Amino acid sequence: MDNTGFSSKRLIPLQICYAEPEKQILLDIEVPENTRLADAISQSGIMDQLSITVKEGEVGIFGKKKPFHTLLKAHDRIEIYRPLKISPQEARRQRARSPGEN
């Protein structure tokens, strides 16, 4: 507790990012310790800037998918993944069919 009688929670710094070919968002925020992944996304305001709804399984920390209930640590980089327009296997097939265009 601090001298006002309230417990003071330490804030931790995070980054939240989302990228499309024509638009990239990178936000630096601070949240209280023991904040969950879903709560940090909500508190960041990034959803107001996106045209998608973020769902469980479409977020991660440093490139590894994580569930919404994951507790965050200082300097975590939260990444919001966008749905693929084409599967990696299909993309390889298409590149193989048109060899001169790579």
Image (cartoon, helix red, strand yellow):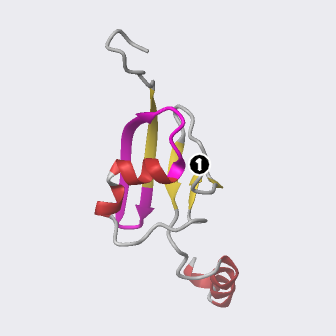
Q: Quadrant of residue 20?
A: bottom left
Image height check: is 87 above or below 76?
Answer: below
Residue 31 lies in the magenta-colored region: yes
Depth check, front residue: 76 or 67: 67
Q: Range of the magenta residues?
A: 18-37
Side of 81 where 2 appears, left or right: left
Rendered residue at 52%/33% (across/down):
75
Rendered residue at 34%/66% (across/down):
50
User: For the view shown, which residue lies furthest in the front direction?
Assistant: 5
Image quadrant containing the N terminus: top left
Depth check, front residue: 50 or 101: 50
Three-letter residue code for mark 1: Ile
Estimate the x, y position of residue 30 in percent, counting from the top left. 39, 35
Rendered residue at 46%/38% (across/down):
14
Q: How many marks?
A: 1
Rendered residue at 68%/80% (across/down):
92
Structural crowding at the residue carrying mark 1, measured as other residues with C-alpha within 10 Å and reported as few (<14), some (14–19) or many (≥20): some
Depth check, front residue: 73 or 16: 73
Would you say the magenta stretch is mainly helix, strand or loop?
strand
Residue 88 lies in the magenta-colored region: no
Image quadrant containing the C terminus: bottom right
Q: Which residue is mark 1?
A: 61
Image height check: is 51 above or below 39?
Answer: below
Depth check, front residue: 66 or 34: 34
Image height check: is 95 above or below 4?
Answer: below
The local secondary structure at tag 1 comes to strand
Estimate the x, y position of residue 74 in percent, counting from the top left. 53, 31
